[in-house]
Amino acid sequence: MGRPFGGGQAAIDVALAVVPLLVVVGAALYLRGQHRRYGRQHGWPGALTTAALVAGTALAAYAVWPLPASVDALCTGGPGPDGAAGASAAAPFGGAHTAGNLALAFGLFVPVGLLARHRFRRGPVVTLLIGAGLAASVGAVRATGVLGLYPCAYAPTSPWLVGLGVAGVLAGWLTARLLLPLWPGGLARGWPVAVPDRVAPDLNRRMAGTLLDLGLWWFGSAALIALLNAYGLVGPGADGRTRAAVLLGVAFVGAVVLPQLRRDRATPGPAALGLGLGGRGLPSPAPRRRVLLRTLLLQAPVAVLVTLGLPWIALAVAAVHASSALVRPDGAGVADLLCGVRVRTRSSLDGGLPSRLVRYSEPREEALAGAGTARGPGETI
């Protein structure tokens, strides 16, 4: 069976763009699910939710590290004594069973077991099945050279490392089960409680949405260019005009078209965190013309400046916008003030509630009793 995209440098370029794009997309989907279920992240459960995202990102990085950028001299080495066939001499930590690799294979999976018990309330059997699946998936990615995109397995691995990953998951679960209850004063519970998401979003949440937008835009554009190159639609190492056209095209779709089509007027990143753009007064979606004006004042200059290779000036534009958000109680940026819009939660715009929010319902016995008293003579339930 042939390698994806014919192997070689074109396939490596695809891996360099698609792998971080998948991480960003996975983070956006995870955060979207958490905010839809529980609303605003807060307290210790919110910190554990973020910790789960960090742990997943760390496992993804471990699976592909160091993700070489060139095929040159990548697979010059022969099979090593530890079974790392085809790994080059530049592979991290040398062989598969060095102290560094063993510690990583065990330590990176400990948070999986700990979070499975303390945050997600999973039992030992389910946790071990999840841990075994994750460890095997990471091992498969390393052993196949990122699923065949690379011509050799540049990162050393072995069944022993996969087994150590499963052992790390079990150790994390046992730690959460046996040691965390001994925390002085008692450790707060790790699972979240759904709350109505109506208060003004804080700056950390808004910044996270912006970072997701930047990641989706940058790595999405890079992935599109790499795929066009891999399929022969553009020449190797696309010229500056092609790259600029793709960057601006993706920015136009994500920052101009999508907000106009969405009820919450949000770009993909803030939408994943349950944010939208509302009017200055009543909590309703902002008018489309005001959202378009805000895009022309904020996202458009940033995209153009980054495309022209002027990221520091783009950062200055973003800093000017954020200057007022740091001091105003409503967190309105300069572009928000000029356009008469405010960043709000989606729940405050459409009245929706988190799906896990506990709602009061009348006990069944009382409901049946009330229905029985309302019936006429001879009627039965």
Image: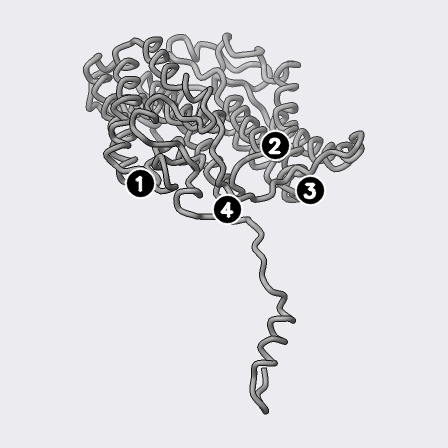
- Real-space CA distance between mark 3 and mark 4, rounded to the nearest whole angstrom: 29 Å
- Reading the image, the residue beneath label 2 is 48
Residue drawn at the location 39% of the way across and 32% of the way down: 343
Q: Secondary structure at mark 4?
A: loop
What's under tag 4, amino acid-wise?
A: Pro
User: Can you tell which of label 2 and label 1 is closer to the viewer?
Assistant: 1
Q: Is residue 74 left or right of residue 267?
A: right
User: Can you tell which of label 3 and label 1 is closer to the viewer?
Assistant: 1
- Reading the image, the residue beneath label 3 is 124
- Real-space CA distance between mark 3 and mark 2, rounded to the nearest whole angstrom: 19 Å
Evaluate whether residue 54 shows in this view.
yes
Residue drawn at the location 33% of the way across and 13% of the way down: 314
CB within 8 Å, label 2 to label 4: no
Residue drawn at the location 63% of the way across and 44% of the way down: 126
- Real-space CA distance between mark 2 and mark 4, rounded to the nearest whole angstrom: 19 Å
- Reading the image, the residue beneath label 4 is 354
Residue 194 at x, y percent in the picture:
56, 44
